Amino acid sequence: MSEAAAAVPRPPPSRREPGDSRREPGRLRRIAGAWFHAGAAGAWGLLALSLVLHLLAWPPGPLPWLVLAADAPFLWLLFRDPTRWKRWVFLYSLLYYGAGFWWLSEITWIQVFLAALFMTPIYLAAGALIRWLVRRRAPWLLVVPTVLVFEELVRTVYMGGMPLPMRSLALTASETLTASTAYLGAYGLSFLAAMGGAAVARLPFHLRRRAWRRLLVDTVAVVLVGGILSALGAARISDRTPRIVSSAPRVLAAVQGAIPQSTKHSPDPDARNRMFQGHLDLSTAAIEDTLAAGEEVVAVLWPETMVPWDFLDADLAARFPEAWENEVRILQNVQACVPPTSRTPRFLLGAIYQFRRGEERHLDPRAYGAHDSLFLVDPVQVPAPDGPYPQPPPPGQRPAWEIARHDKHVLVPGGEYTPLGELLPPLRWARNLVSVVPELDPGPEAQEPLLLVDGPDGGIRAGTVLCFELLSPAPCRARRAAGADVLLNPSNYGWFGETAFRAQIRAVARLRAAETAATVVVAGNTGPTLFYDPLGRPYGRFRPFPDEEAAEPLESNANTFRRGFAVAPLLVDPEPTPYVRWGDLPWYGLGLLVLGFGLFAPRSRDAPVTWGGYPSTCSEPRAKSFDSPQGV
């Protein structure tokens, strides 16, 4: 080309004149163009590969170790196109969260979409942070797992106790890895899984360039981290197993009524009476069965809100005498269900607690504030039906039979409360269309443990994490730090049918037990109902009722939607774990270290992007036009 020809300026881009019929593509067409064009087949293949890997790894998937490679497709999508990566990551996060929350479709499919859509900004932020740190040449095998651990940390807070799916759930298949969470929590397993994904993502570069040394470094790094965690877990199992103290023959009974959601939320009084009577029958059977085995039930745990009538605070009890009388009659029936040959145990009853906020006044008690609560009740203190009728206690005091009450603190957004509902009332109207649960108020964050078993050494104390609170590590650590030896999880997981959620919640219970060194007791309406010891190992057996069948292991799926009860002694580890003491501080320190790589090693905007030491496709200039093909 001659110098004269080279000097000819390019014509300016054509502009649409008035009256020109040609139209530029709209925003929706441009977005769709990022997903459907000649070069998009490879990206769609990565999306499909990611879903397959995660579904095979997440409980109850048959190949849990695939979680060590499951993040690689996300990283390939993140770096394969510099101009459209945000649209692909947005679609990836929708599918990722949609697959993880698919059990919500048992309620309504719209909740799956809304939950996934609600959390897509987290993955977009994680992708942007990884790209930013990679441009500044931060260590690849440190950046990726650290950022993805914070993706889970933020997700836990953002969703208010509903962080599933978690990478760590798959690795509970290993007993030693589960026990290692006593040091760094479940996020330690998430770090290992994400580190494996980062190493697998670089594997094609290593093989194509024959970089055997880097391949060896990646392999050794992942194996070393996994080996350290396994060694820590094995040492903890060996050290703590002899120190775990059993409360036998004093045991706790957890009942499972298997009440269908249609019956539980039915306005029919007969349905409510049948539901209540069914739990009374199960309590009687559990106490009698335990007596026959030469043991003593010290407490009976009912699932969440299985008392189908509300309890009231003292002020509302005086204003609504019929509701107060109903509460007394309920507890008199609980007292009567204990066999006369048995010592009366304490009962842990799940019910909605109505209370008055400030000076508000309503004609309907349900218009007042509401907590999702667990009541520790001593039936011995309830007046007999033929005795004098008790009057409501003075304002600010509890009835004599109510030893303590725990209120759910971490609520599920969209299910138990409406985010921004006070500012935008139509949001509450929309929430009520998809949820029959009343708008709840959060309870206090700090709650004193409940005394379940007396003893010269202080007895056994229990903290409660109601329903989805079990999914958040923070309240479980807080209850253990406050002195709880046992974590009780009264729950109603009947919404989700026989889905993968059953296996996932069992994995979560294992993690919380091992993280805190506290026995976790789950009392699920339709299951699971189970015990995990302070090392995350299941124990005890489930007794179907009224069937005369043999008892099933507590982790068996055969217990789902069956009436019965689980009875087992409470196991206590007197020493809390390091994770209870220092919490997530090590992760925040690691996050600051990784962020420092980006802040103190600035690069120019046009600096080449290296992907763990290799040039990335982000370094290659690409056209940004609507119809330009996309390379791999």
Image (cartoon, grey):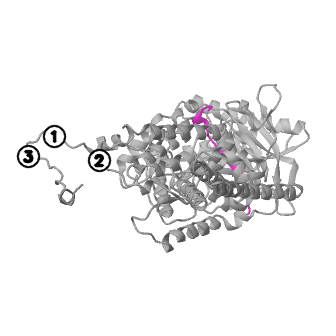
Q: How many residues crowd mark 3 within 10 Å: few (<14), some (14–19), many (20+)? A: few
Residue 139 location in percent, x, y? 58, 63
* Pointer 3 residue: 18
Name the residue located 66 percent from the left edge and 46 percent from the top edge: 169
* Pointer 1 residue: 22
Secondary structure beneath label 3: loop
Q: How many residues crowd mark 2 within 10 Å: few (<14), some (14–19), many (20+)? A: few
Point out the image quarter for the C terminus: top left
- Magenta run includes residue 496: yes
Q: Residue furthest top?
A: 548
Residue 18 location in percent, x, y? 8, 46
Which numbered disc, 2 or 3, marks the residue closer to the eye? 2
Image quadrant where residue 522 sits: top right
Q: Left of 425 or right of it: where is 320?
A: right
For badge 1, the amino acid type reads Arg
Give the CA separation, mark 2 to mark 3: 23 Å
Q: Left of 323 or right of it: where is 18?
A: left
Q: Earlier in the sequence, mark 2 or mark 1?
A: 1
Which numbered disc, 2 or 1, marks the residue closer to the eye? 2
Q: Earlier in the sequence, mark 2 or mark 3?
A: 3
* Pointer 2 residue: 625
Q: Left of 87 or right of it: where is 4?
A: left
